[in-house]
Amino acid sequence: MQLTTTEVKLFLLTQFIFKMRAVDTLVVHCSASPEGRPHTVADIRSWHKAQGWSDIGYHYVVYLDGSVHPGRPVEKIGAHVVGHNKGSIGIVYVGGTDAKGRSKDTRTAAQRASLRKLLTELAAKYKVKRILGHHDLFAGKDCPCFDAKSEYADIVKGLK
């Protein structure tokens, strides 16, 4: 299922109406899956539940074709970066490794465009202070396999 911009906005509004929590950070992740291999919200939810989690840890998933799909409801605290879940929203793009499992920025052009659009919308809606990659908050991780903090700095700067 691919969401239209209107559906994403409606979803965001619905999340805000129902007990929205304070959010000041957007955290970008990769699914740590091989380049070009499609995975779905259901796949990631299954991986996370197999780890004993209650649900998918991320709030949004960006597929290879750039379509954006809801994961865990935004009003619920995510499970995507230890010690930083309470005030953040987790966004994951499908990919992040080469065929041999080595870290690699595998974002498609469609994923790049959709990530930027989604992050811009979320940053404006929640007046976030920062957009970071998982590795910026958790040393020893390559995720999301690119420098999200630098790449998206202009989004946050534009809110000031």
Image (cartoon, grey):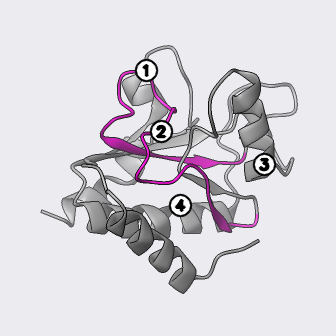
Helix, strand or loop: magenta stretch: loop
Q: Which residue is mark 2?
A: 78
Q: Are marks 4 and 2 in contact (CB under 8 Å)?
A: no
Q: CA distance from mark 1 to mark 2?
A: 15 Å
Q: CA distance from mark 3 to mark 1?
A: 25 Å
Which marked residue is nearer to the observer: mark 3 or mark 1?
A: 3
The C terminus, quarter of image: bottom left
Q: Are marks 1 and 4 in contact (CB under 8 Å)?
A: no
Q: CA distance from mark 2 to mark 3?
A: 16 Å
Name which of mark 1 and mark 2 comes first in the sequence: 2
Q: Which residues are magenta?
A: 65-94
Which marked residue is nearer to the observer: mark 3 or mark 4?
A: 3
Q: Residues within 10 Å of mark 2 (few under 14, many from 20)?
A: many
> Looking at the picture, does residue 87 appear above or below residue 143?
below
Left or right of residue 55, residue 24 in this image: left
The residue furthest top is 140
Q: Which residue is mark 3?
A: 42
Name which of mark 3 and mark 4 comes first in the sequence: 3
Residue 97 lies in the magenta-colored region = no
In x, y percent, where is residue 91? 52, 49
Name which of mark 1 and mark 4 comes first in the sequence: 4
